[in-house]
Amino acid sequence: MLRWLKSRLPTQRRLIQLYSALLYNAHLKGFVQGNIYTGPTKALCVPGFNCYSCPGAVGACPLGSLQNALASSGARAPTYVLGILMLFGLTLGRTICGFLCPMGLAQELLYKIPTPKVQKSPFTRVLSYLKYVILAVFVVIVPLMYALQSYPVPAFCKYICPVGTLEGAVGLLAHPVNAEAFSMLGLLFTRKFVILVIITSICVFVYRAFCRFLCPLGAIYGFFSRLALLGVKVDQPRCTDCGACVARCPMDIRRVGDHECIHCGACMAACPTKAIAWKGARITLHGHETPRPAHARGGRALAWALALAVLGGALWFYNRSEPMVADGAASIVTQAPQDDIPTGSEVGMRCPDFTVPLYGADGAAFTLSAQRGKVVVINFWATWCTPCCKELPYFQQLADAYPDDVALVAIHSALVTDDVPAYLAKMPYTMPFALDETGEVIASLGGSTMLPQTIILDRNGLIAYNQVGSVTYNFLEAQVLPLLEQ
Amino acid sequence: MAKRIRRAWPWLTALLVILAAALLIAQAVAVYAAGNAPENLTEAGVHIQPVYSREIVLARLRAIGAPLWVCVAAAVVGLALGAGAGEPRLSVPPERQLGRLMARLPAVLPEASADAALLHREAQNRRRAWLACAVACLAALLFSAAYLLDPGHFTSWELEAVMGRMLLALAPWMGLAFGALCAAAFFHRASVRRAIPAARRLAAMGRVSPLPPPAKPERGRAALRLGLYVAAAALVVLGVLNGGLRDVLVKAINICTECIGLG
């Protein structure tokens, strides 16, 4: 029994994988509250693959950030994300895949399910080049092509990424507080869910299937395989070129340390001459047979103690209760009660009045109470949000179709990254665009971190529709027409 | 008996995993199909009721709950039994075997030897196969690049249609490239396997030559690494100054509903 338990104790690599997965997702209260972390550490990319829309995520996904940086490269060069990826690649290379990637950990755990396994072959070796195609097409070319039109398209996130579906979509939908978000699901979710299930089930039979064949982040780090500071190395004079390392490796490597090698260190035990060791083994992990100086054990314990202290600190910092911020928006006016209808953000409630400054109109502003008698359509959008940009023409179409009866305003999110007036100057829109300078307007209308959001008010200022998610012209018209007939 | 169960268990678990995946996919497709049935659409094509709701999803999950739990239980029992465990198959790749043998061949091969001729012929065949593969891959790359680098293909904001057209346009070329690579890889392996016995016979008659020491461009690599570090640090600083850091923050603290597959 003891031997059975001992044989199942996690290895040091597995502990590091678990540690990094927990550290990346230290905002545990996000899972409890059904929201995401919105603090400043989200400006930093984590090295592994971890969706920043995961309720637990405390850092940014490097791949999502890269796509968005490329998508907005018309406004500014994507130097920050490229620099970060280079730093990670040069320091750790694909050691990140082997040690610091939560997706890699998930795949390895799935592979532990006892089923017949698909062995590597020339076919899997060829298939491993697919990730470079995905990197080129979905991560680089498509976002760049649409950047020419100021239209952000993170194609990999939108069409393939199973991590976003699992951590972001399923992670948020699992919480009852986001029950309304189900109403926006459709073809996109169905397709991505099917992709997630297929990839997950393939990972049960094929070792790290996503990592080997599809992951563009691994492809990027693979470019740095020869330059990375950390990883495994072969002591050439001791190597007899027997091939035991390649035979033992479940990845599609040709030799230890090449662009397919995730530096997991499994080959060390297989090497009969013990020619494989860690680069910088004095300060990093030790292989199975790497000579370990006496002081190393104490050093390792100290490193783990330090790491656990960091983790404990992170868990405390991200999950501590924050003081309640007093509500009180200068531009939000809670109207004096005219009737028994409460003011709020839910359907049937009276919409709180607000005033927002309009773009391109010196000093002009949009005041909700001034629109009384008209059906009002309020759209919250942002230049960096793909579905927001896509649905703007539908709002313009609505404004053109009902110029006298429908008052429409598209309000940009408080967080402005691009030059919104420059963006609008390139587009043929004539409807009013405003800025929610403090984020108080969207907050007063029940908005959170999800975009786009559309609110439709009837002629009396009562909320008839308030949902996050994309809309179409037909949908908008179907919502507005009954209100016009009232 | 226990051994037989341990051997059969992985196959049972495999079947259950496939069944669970198929059920999950079928339920998702069924929800979508029901939500888009004509009776749930107005004349303008707008959904009367949302396609998905928490209640619908929970009901669908409950319907397939039993097989899903059986699948989980089978996996757990299999892990406890140690089913399917054991040493992985260790087989040295034939390419590596041939490489080792070739390093031990006599410096001058006997010209009249059939084995030497076979080795020469196979090496030539492998070169030809890879050359043909390279030509096919280059053609695929050029035609794919011609499509991808034409901004005219990416003007529409109807991304579903654009992606569909792109995949249709690229699929034949990607198929050609992967087909050529697979064919070359399998031909290469078969050729290497044919060459190994001949190389073994020749190696046995010749002297054993030591492996040549590999070149070590360590100094050049260190300089390149340092240069790239400096460049990366400069890029990060530039990115912080030009607002790239704020871009990342803004994107990470907001949820783009389409980007995570919500809609």
Image (cartoon, coloured by chain):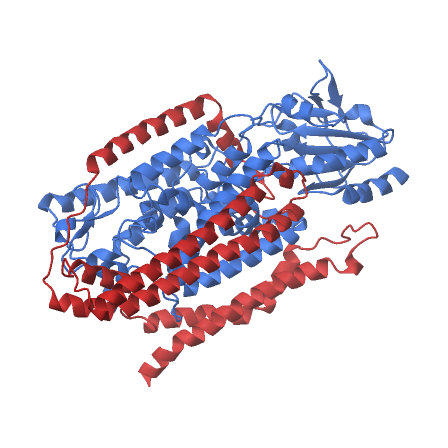
Task: Give the color of chain B as drawn.
Answer: red
Judge by depth and name the residue closer to the eye, A147 or A104. Answer: A147
Left or right of residue A19, residue A1 in this image: left
Return the residue found at the far right: A485
The reply to whether residue A270 is visible in this rendering is: no
Judge by depth and name the residue closer to the eye, A427 or B56. Answer: A427
Q: Residue B151's spot in the image, x, y percent?
A: 61, 37
Left or right of residue B171, residue A50 in this image: left
In this rendering, the count of numbered labels is 0
Vertical side of B36 occupied by A316: above or below: above
Return the residue found at the far front: B112
| Quarter of the rendering occupied by the N terminus of chain B | bottom left
Vertical side of A359 occupied by A485: above or below: below
According to the colouring, which chain is blue? Answer: A
Return the residue found at the far top: A362
Judge by depth and name the residue closer to the eye, A231 or B66. Answer: A231
The reply to whether residue A100 is visible in this rendering is: yes
Q: Residue A238's spot in the image, x, y percent?
A: 13, 53
Q: Residue A42's spot in the image, x, y percent?
A: 46, 34
Q: Residue B234's spot in the image, x, y percent?
A: 37, 24
Q: Quadrant of residue B124?
A: bottom left
Residue found 60% across the figure and 23% down from its top: A419
Residue found 58% across the figure and 68% down from its top: B64
Vertical side of B19 occupied by A154: above or below: above
